[in-house]
Amino acid sequence: MATKKTAKKPAKKTAKKTARKTASQVVVVNMIPRSLSGEANQDSEPTITVNPANPLQIAASAFTPDPGRGNFAPIYTSNDGGNTWTLKSIVPSSAADGSATADITVAFSSASNKLYAGIIRLPFPGNKTRLNILRTDNFQSGTAMKVLVDRTGQGVDQPYVAATTANGKDRIYVGDNDFNSTPNTATIDQTMDGGKKTKPPFTSVRIESRATSGQDGPPVRPAIHSDGTVYAAFHSWRTFNGSTGAGTADVVVVRDDNGGTGTKKFQALVDPADNKVGVRVVQNTKFNFNGFLGLQRTGGDVALAVDPTNSANVWVAYNDDQGTNYVLHVLRSTNRGLTWSTDVRTIVNALNPALAVNAAGTVALLYQQLTGTGANQRWVTNFETTTNGTTWKSITLATTPANSPAKIFDPYLGDYEHLTAAGNDFYGVFCANNTPSKTNFPQGVTYQRNADFTKQILLDVDNKTPVDVSIDPFFFKVTSP
């Protein structure tokens, strides 16, 4: 590079102009509204969805209780592309159980403006988790979401909702770990008409074809392509020690070429090694369901994304235990999941992977990595992109203290965070320590809640009284150049 002394002014101007043109624009927003500046909850485990019909409309979720402590938990809503956020308490819950939900994920359909949610509803009757699948025709209203599915039985874990619109009807796919189907618990609950005025019919599709150790792992992740291809990835448990929490698992991908219709749902992929449904992307990975990385529990994260420009291109991320490290891996398939690459990205002591592919075919990876030692440990939240699977560009969104605040419950940051794309832009959400420090957010940050960045303290609604540090959800948007 030319030194300042020898560089010519025109060259410097040209270089600056080019840099501005090619740099991505990054927006990071603390989502807690100003009216809730006094809250200090562990608002962890977030998801986000952008309305494809109107990207200014965004909904998100976290373990956030109703501010009024009523019988409906809130979702986060934005009508200005994520710059500002409000809470709408429209998710069925229970005041006696904290006015929140357990697991919750949200997804807009692709054309109908309807918002869907999959939740573990409180309370748990008979100590068995309760699945609800929900819908609202207007996410901005204060009207309670309509219950489409209400199931208890032996319990259901970690519902993860995806939605699309095909032939004028909303197709809903909820990946979940359904103990009503023990020992093969990996399930897709689906409907081909989620917008039906009366309760739409849902079918439970069991996607595990192999013998398990007694159950599959919690994450079951669907991914939809507009051509009717639907993938799902899950953590297929081969062994599990209930005393220690240690086990081995395969990461399995299944595919349906007809949107989940027909008689052989999610059976398009067959593993050539054992001729069973579902290709084993990797086999016999180690996990510890009682393990921890910092204050965050581990156990085998899984993420999945399909390229909207080509349904043959699909990406998987997963974690495994390697000695004392918890290692994040990213792999790709270019032939509709038939065969898979070796690692195209490997990150030590990172978790909560989320994947998305934009309209240009650019792949994005979001994750949180534990760095440092002892009291100096930090959670670093990184966003990376690649166009070829080989070269990755990284943006650090946050670097926050890992040992503060104290943990209230598991999971500390969440068993997952979330990333999605609308057009060429990426939208995401993560949870982190909310200390108002500019050095904690290298791309800058906007706080809705009252905060003093000079003194690095949170302030109550009166903008005077100090508030304890806690875990908050943070929205971000990366606008491609």
Image (cartoon, helix red, strand yellow):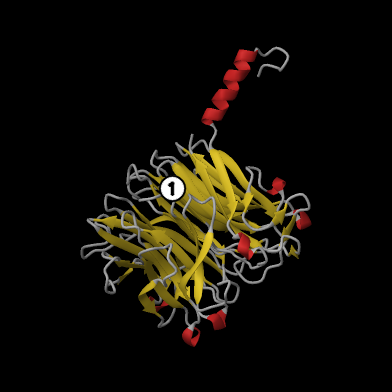
| Residue 58 versus residue 297 in the image, above or below | above
Residue at left offset 46%, top offset 67%: 238
Residue 137 visible to an observer of this rendering: yes
Q: In the rendered image, is residue 270 in sight?
A: no
**479 to the left or right of 260:** right
Please name the residue that numbered disc 1 is placed on: 421
Residue 456 against residue 194 in the figure, above or below: above
Residue 331, above or below 466: above
- Which x, y percent locates residue 341? 43, 45
Q: Nearer the viewer, residue 334 or 93?
A: 93
Kind of element beneath mark 1: strand
Residue at 71% from the left image edge and 46% from the top image edge? 439
**Residue 368 image point, x, y percent:** 60, 53
Tell me residue 111's x, y (percent): 31, 54
Q: Nearer the viewer, residue 416 or 94?
A: 94
Nearest the viewer among 332 and 155 is 155
Residue, far bottom: 126
Give the percent coordinates (x, y) of residue 196: 26, 68
Q: Quadrant of residue 209?
A: bottom left
